[in-house]
Structures are given as structure tokens and as C-alpha cells.
Amino acid sequence: MADKYLGRWEPFRDMLNLRADMDKVFSSFFGGFIEEREGFWAPVIDIEEDRDSIIVEAEIPGMKKEDIKVAVHGNMLSITGERKQEGETKNKTFHRIERAYGKFSRTITLPVDVDTDKVKASYKDGILKIKLSKPETGKLKQIDVEIT
């Protein structure tokens, strides 16, 4: 009689519910950068630094370079744009749409100020690469110690 009141175990449904719960946890922990919201999304990025520069790479596939804007002010880098869905949707049935469309924006605080006159950006194969040169005054200068 007790079995009558227990729910039927559906392992696949339970796994999907667990995945949805885990996605919510990771999204809230990482600030939702990867999560798509209605008409707004943010590209994923990598940031690396060497002695002379900072290099930022952003994944922005399916874009024209004219539709991507890059701005630098002090130690702040902004990447914005809009990816538009192509073509007519009349007389079509979509079974799944996973690619993000709409406006995007990503603002990054860089570890140091950069020389805004020496910023270079290139876009190839869906990857935006931005090279930001460090100013001469911000570079570490090594001084040899003399023995007297």
C-alpha cells in the first residue's frame, strides 16, 4: 500500500533535473558570463600577459569584423557588438536553436594600464585577438647591483 504513494522512479528525468540544478549552481558561481539571456550574451575570453603586453582572445564566431567594437580606457577593455540571425524564418520549423544571437558586451578590468595608442585587434576564424602594449613607464626595469 505504501508503494501507491511513492512516485515512479524515472532515472532519465531525474538526471535532467540534476543537470539543470547543477547548471544553475555553476552559472551563479561564475557570474553567468556564459549563460545566454534574452537577446543578450557574452563571449568567452582568455587573457594572457607577458613582459611587454596583454593579449585578450575572445570567441565570437559568425560575425563580421565591422560588427565588433573594441574600446580601451585606462585599464578597462570593452568588447561589444551584435550577432544577427540570418534569413527568413517563414515556412520553417526549428527543432533546436543553441547558438546565441543578439547584442553582446564584455568589459574586462586589465591588470595594468595599457598604451591606448598601441592597441592592435585582429579577427580571424571567429577569434578576436587584441594585443595591448604596456606603457614604457609600467614595465619592470631591472637594475644591476654593483659590488663596491
Image (tube, rainbow, N blue to C red):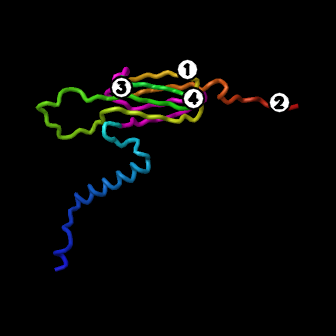
Question: Outermost residue, left direction?
Answer: 91
Task: Answer few, some or many: residues within 10 Å of disc 2's Cα (few below 14, many 20 plus, some between 14 and 19).
Answer: few
| Local SS, label 4 | loop
Q: Which mark is residue 146?
A: 2
Quarter of the picture containing the C terminus is top right
Residue 5 at x, y percent in the picture: 19, 74
Q: Position of residue 127 (x, y in %)?
A: 39, 28
Whether residue 81 is in magenta: the answer is no
Outermost residue toward the right?
148
Q: Are marks 4 and 3 in contact (CB under 8 Å)?
A: no
The residue that disc 4 covers is 74
- Mark in the foreground, 3 or 1: 1
Residue type beneath disc 1: Lys
Q: Is 76 on the left-hand or right-hand side of 6?
A: right
Q: CA distance from mark 3 to mark 1?
A: 23 Å
Of mark 2 and mark 3, the one earlier in the sequence is 3
Local crowd at mark 1 within 10 Å, few (<14), some, or many (≥20)?
Answer: few
Q: Amino acid at mark 3?
A: Asp
Q: Which residues are magenta?
A: 41-66
First in sequence: mark 2 vs mark 4: 4
Residues under labels 2 and 3: Cα distance?
A: 51 Å
First in sequence: mark 1 vs mark 2: 1
- Residue under label 3, please give it: 125
- Which quarter of the figure has residue 22? bottom left
Label 4 neighbour load within 10 Å: few <14, some 14-19, many 20+: few
The three-letter code of the residue at mark 2 reads Glu
Disc 1, disc 4: CB below 8 Å?
Answer: no
* Residue found at x 31% / y 40%: 38
Callout 2 secondary element = loop
CA gap, disc 2 to disc 4?
A: 36 Å
Residue at mark 1: 118
